[in-house]
Image: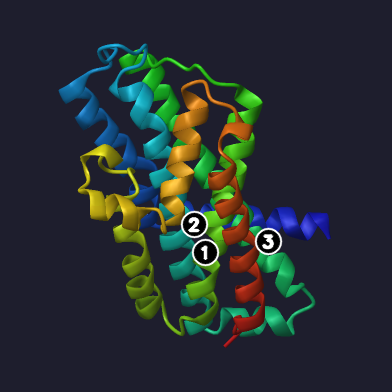
Amino acid sequence: MFQRYFRLTRMEFILYLREPSGFFFTLIFPLLLMMLFGSIWGNDPFPGVNFGYIDYAVPAFIGMVIATSGIMCLTTSIAAYREKGILRRFKASPISPLLVLTAELSSLFIITVLGMLLLLAAGVFVFGMRFYGNIPEVILAFILSTLSISALGFIPASLAPTARSGMIIANVMYFPMLFLSGAMLPGDMLPSFLKTFSQVLPLTHVIELLQGLWLGGHLWEYPVQIAVLCGVTVAGFVIAAKCFRWE
C-alpha cells in the first residue's frame, strides 16, 4: 500500500512540474511579487518596531502559495481527471480511490513546501529577512493552514465536471481571497467595510496566524484563527466526502 502511495505521489508531483501555468503561479509568481515589492520598500525596520516589510510580508506570500496550490491547482487537477475519465478508471482499479486523493494532496503539499522554501531563501539571502517566532509553532500553523485551504478547495473539486468549470469556480474563490486577505496588499490598506468582509475568508485567518507567529506570537494567542481554520478543515472534507463525484 505504501509503495503504491509513494509511486502515485511521485507521479502526481512530476505531472505537476510539467504543467507550466501551475508551476509558474505556485512557485514563481509569489517570488516575483516579493522581489518586486521588496525592491520598492526594502526591509528596514518600520518606525517603532523591529521588523521591516519583507519580515512582515513573507508569511503573506506563503499564504498566497497555499491558496494557489490548495484551490487553483487542486480544483483544476481533479476536475480534469474527472473530465477525462481518469477518476472513473481509478475507481474501477485495485487502487483505493482514497489512496489516489491522498497522493494528490501529498504532491500538492510538497509543491507548497517548495514554494515556501523559495520565498524563505530569497528573503534571507536577498533582503536579510528576520524571524522572531518559534519554528515548531510556525510549522504546525503552516500544516493547519495548508489542510484548511486544501479542504476548501476539495469542495469545488468534488463537483466540477470539467477542467474549465473547475477553473472558473477556483477563480471565483481565489481572487477575492488573494486581494482581500492581505496576501497581495496589507490588510490595513483596505477600507473598513472590506476589512470586515475579509474576516469571512479563510485565507485572512491563515495570514493573520502566520504573520503573528512569524513576528514572535504564540499559538495560544490566536484562538479565533485556529478555530476558524480547524472548522474549515473539518467542514471542507466532510462536504467533499458527501458530494464527491467520480464521473
Sequence-first tag of 1 and 3: 3
Number of the label disc, if any, that sits on residue 102: 3
The percent position of residue 169, horizontal first and vertical second, equals 37, 73
Number of the label disc, if any, that sits on residue 152: 1
Q: Which residue is mark 2?
A: 70
17 lies above or below 33: below
The percent position of residue 218, horizontal first and vertical second, equals 59, 27
Mark 3–mark 2 Cα distance, whole angstroms, equals 13 Å
Given contact means CB atoms under 8 Å apart, are the residues at marks 2 and 1 in contact? yes
Residue at x 50%, y 58% (from the top left corner)? 15
Q: Secondary structure at mark 3?
A: helix
Which amino acid lies under the numbered mark 3 shown in the image of this protein? Thr
Sequence-first tag of 3 and 2: 2
Q: Is residue 127 visible?
A: yes
41 and 128: which is toward the camera:
41
The percent position of residue 43, horizontal first and vertical second, equals 28, 16
The percent position of residue 122, horizontal first and vertical second, equals 37, 23
Quarter of the picture holding the N terminus: bottom right
Which amino acid lies under the numbered mark 1 shown in the image of this protein? Leu
Sequence-first tag of 2 and 1: 2
Quarter of the picture holding the C terminus: bottom right
Q: Nearer the viewer, mark 1 or mark 3?
A: 1
Query: How would you rate the neighbour count of disc 2 (Cα within 10 Å): few for under 14, some for 14-19, many for 20 or more?
Result: many
Query: How would you rate the neighbour count of disc 3 (Cα within 10 Å): few for under 14, some for 14-19, many for 20 or more?
Result: some
Q: Nearer the viewer, mark 2 or mark 1?
A: 1
134 and 104: which is toward the camera:
134
